[in-house]
């Protein structure tokens, strides 16, 4: 199990699009094990999605994100748990202990479990597969993947 | 100033149209007015006590916070434009101002931020400037989404594009989106309707003329090709272009040189041509009313835009967009369409496509004083016909009845295909098949 947190400093970035660092954790006996970090590509969210798709992570946990970014992540096959807030440690610990159910207790205000990111833009109304089409060739990064 | 004693500050803040929130020195939200809640979509009770970045979720929260800058400098920061993301994933453009909050002794206790929703303003500005992007073309239709998905590559290619589609399907919008996505976006986008001008005038309009080329030609006039130099020329209704002019267009496409009327030498131009038509060009080529060599020269990249009746799932989405636009334009606050209006629109065949839908909404805005647009606000030619259809729901072939039931279910569910599927007890594929059969029947 490899989880990735889209971070700004020691907390989850407010928006996935403005994350400056990606932190990776494995899970061993319900405890998160840090397994690497990488700076978020400075060339935009499309490059970040390529990077995440190439890493084969099991789940991306992030703060808010636009419907277009959510659609692009889904098209790239990156499982995502969005609209979560808190410190990286807090979120990683919650995931390791109780998975999505535990992490959902850290949802951002105004983001009930049903509805957030699944509304207008989440359905692709105002965005199209364009972002996916714009993606650059797959990028890779070396991350120590813990079992 | 005695009135302030009787009115609470909170009450005044709640009457403002702009969002206002305050934070303490640990960035915890201590006040959140009614407009802030309405604009962000976060209830006040959930916002209070939370970190401001968890609630505001703007593009500057991570690293470029205006409030932090204001507190650091000890003075206000105003009118920064940015966007934040609402819980439904939509981006909202706003302008913000931030300032430190001080006590009576001047000690900073926290900060205050005010913000204004610029969505309506941006909507109008975009329309005025023609700055349409792919994201501005609204569609949930998989067919249309596929077309939109390849626009960036088409835009980057620089090839000539031929856009086919019925009148009102958004051919110019797509042409503008291609231009705005392309490396030529910094240069002009010039649109010419080839069907709107007589042959002589069209030639002068496209290629320009020299002084003395004809009576009244008192000075040189550059044509649209020169006006679009470095950018994109959109030739709308190319199927209506007279044959002699077709030859000249062909020459420009082949040699990149135009010959203004009365000129003795050609003028080189660097223009990308995007042509569009609602006519059947292949048939016109067969009938020799359109030059085959020009057809093949234009037909490098071909985009076929679906008619609105082929994508009924987009009707609620587009209607909502036009209501928002009309609200912004006329300063009204119409809430949307009543369910029975949406049902009628879903059954309408829209020969005028998206433009017709826009006109219907515009008409309804004239009659609708407020609240929801109701059937009596629709144009008369729409209502009686639809009433007749409603009175005889089981008329027509089985396919047609199924299609109507599917369209009605989509209307009842505000265009949400999955909800319509659940209501009808069919899969999404089946729903698409039913709607697809309806399309074929209509085309037959």
Image (spheres, rainbow, N blue to C red):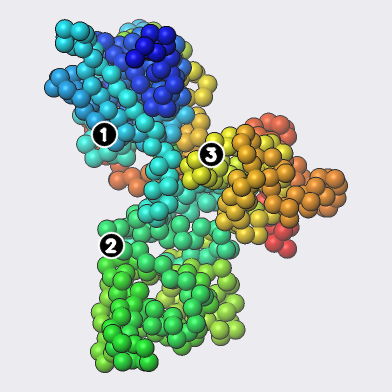
Q: Relative to B56, is B432 above or below?
A: below
- Dot 1 falls on a residue whose secondary structure is strand
Pointer 2: what residue? B187
How far from the left and from the top, in percent, is residue A72? 40, 38
The span from disc 1 to disc 3 (Cα, nearest Å) is 27 Å
Q: Which residue is label 3 attached to?
A: B332
Q: Secondary structure at mark 3?
A: loop
The answer to whether residue B232 is seen in the rendering is: yes
Q: Residues within 10 Å of mark 1 (few under 14, many from 20)?
A: few
| Residue at 47 percent of width and 49 percent of height | B137
Q: CA distance from mark 3 to mark 2?
A: 36 Å
Please tell me whether residue A50 is drawn above or below residue B400 in the rendered image: above
- Residue pictured at 36% horizontal, 88% vertical: B216
Marks 3, 2: nearer the viewer: 3
Q: Which residue is mark 1?
A: B80
The earlier-in-sequence mark between 1 and 2 is 1
Q: Quadrant of residue B4?
A: top left
Q: Earlier in the sequence, mark 3 or mark 2?
A: 2
**Is tag 1's residue or tag 3's residue first in the polypeptide sequence?**
1
């Amino acid at each position: 199990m490899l989880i990735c947190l889209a971070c700004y400093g020691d907390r989850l970035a407010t928006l996935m699009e403005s994350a400056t660092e990606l932190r990776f954790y494995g899970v061993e006996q319900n405890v998160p094990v840090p397994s690497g970090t990488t700076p978020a590509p400075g060339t935009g969210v499309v490059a970040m999605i390529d990077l995440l798709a190439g890493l084969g992570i099991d789940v991306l946990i992030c703060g808010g994100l636009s419907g277009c970014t959510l659609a692009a992540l889904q098209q790239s096959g990156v499982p995502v748990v969005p609209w979560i807030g808190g410190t990286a440690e807090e979120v990683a610990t919650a995931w390791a202990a109780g998975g999505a159910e535990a992490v959902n207790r850290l949802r951002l205000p105004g983001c009930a479990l049903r509805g957030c990111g699944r509304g207008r833009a989440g359905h692709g109304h105002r965005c199209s597969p364009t972002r996916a089409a714009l993606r650059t060739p797959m990028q890779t990064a070396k991350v120590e993947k813990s079992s | 100033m005695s009135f302030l004693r009787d009115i609470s500050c909170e009450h005044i803040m709640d009457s403002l149209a702009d969002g206002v929130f305050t934070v303490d020195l640990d960035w915890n939200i201590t006040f959140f007015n009614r407009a802030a809640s309405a604009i962000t979509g976060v209830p006040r009770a959930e916002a209070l006590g939370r970190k401001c970045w968890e609630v505001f979720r703007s593009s500057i929260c991570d690293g470029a916070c205006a409030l932090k800058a204001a507190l650091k400098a000890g003075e206000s920061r105003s009118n920064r434009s940015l966007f934040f993301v609402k819980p439904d994933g939509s981006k909202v453009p706003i302008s913000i101002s931030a300032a430190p909050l001080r006590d009576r002794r001047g000690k900073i206790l926290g900060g205050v931020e005010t913000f204004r929703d610029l969505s309506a303003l941006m909507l109008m500005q975009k329309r005025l400037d023609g700055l349409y992007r792919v994201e501005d073309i609204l569609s949930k239709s998989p067919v249309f989404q596929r077309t939109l998905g390849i626009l960036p590559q088409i835009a980057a290619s620089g090839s000539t594009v031929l856009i086919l589609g019925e009148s009102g399907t958004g051919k110019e919008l797509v042409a503008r989106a291609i231009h705005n996505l392309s490396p030529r976006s910094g240069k002009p986008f010039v649109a010419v309707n080839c069907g709107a001008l007589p042959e002589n005038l069209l030639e002068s309009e496209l290629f320009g003329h020299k002084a003395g080329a004809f009576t009244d030609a008192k000075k040189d006039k550059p044509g649209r090709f020169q006006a679009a130099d470095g950018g994109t020329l959109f030739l709308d209704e190319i199927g209506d272009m007279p044959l002699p002019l077709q030859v000249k267009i062909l020459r420009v496409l082949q040699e990149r040189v135009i010959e203004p009327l009365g000129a003795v030498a050609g003028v080189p131009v660097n223009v990308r041509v995007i042509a569009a038509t609602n006519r059947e060009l292949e048939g016109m080529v067969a009938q020799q009313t359109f030059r085959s060599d020009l057809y093949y020269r234009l037909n490098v990249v071909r985009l076929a835009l679906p008619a609105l009746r082929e994508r009924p799932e987009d009707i609620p989405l587009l209607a909502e967009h036009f209501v928002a636009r009309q609200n912004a334009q006329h300063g009204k606050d119409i809430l949307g369409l009543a369910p029975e209006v949406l049902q009628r629109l879903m059954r309408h065949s829209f020969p005028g496509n998206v433009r017709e839908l826009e006109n219907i909404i515009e008409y309804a805005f004239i009659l609708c004083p407020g609240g929801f647009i109701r059937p009596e606000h629709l144009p008369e030619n729409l209502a009686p016909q639809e009433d007749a259809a409603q009175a005889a729901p089981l008329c027509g072939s089985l396919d047609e009845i199924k299609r109507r039931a599917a369209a009605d279910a989509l209307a009842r569910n505000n265009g949400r295909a999955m909800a319509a599927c659940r209501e009808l007890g069919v899969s999404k594929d089946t729903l698409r098949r039913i709607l697809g059969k309806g399309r074929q029947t209509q085309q037959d």
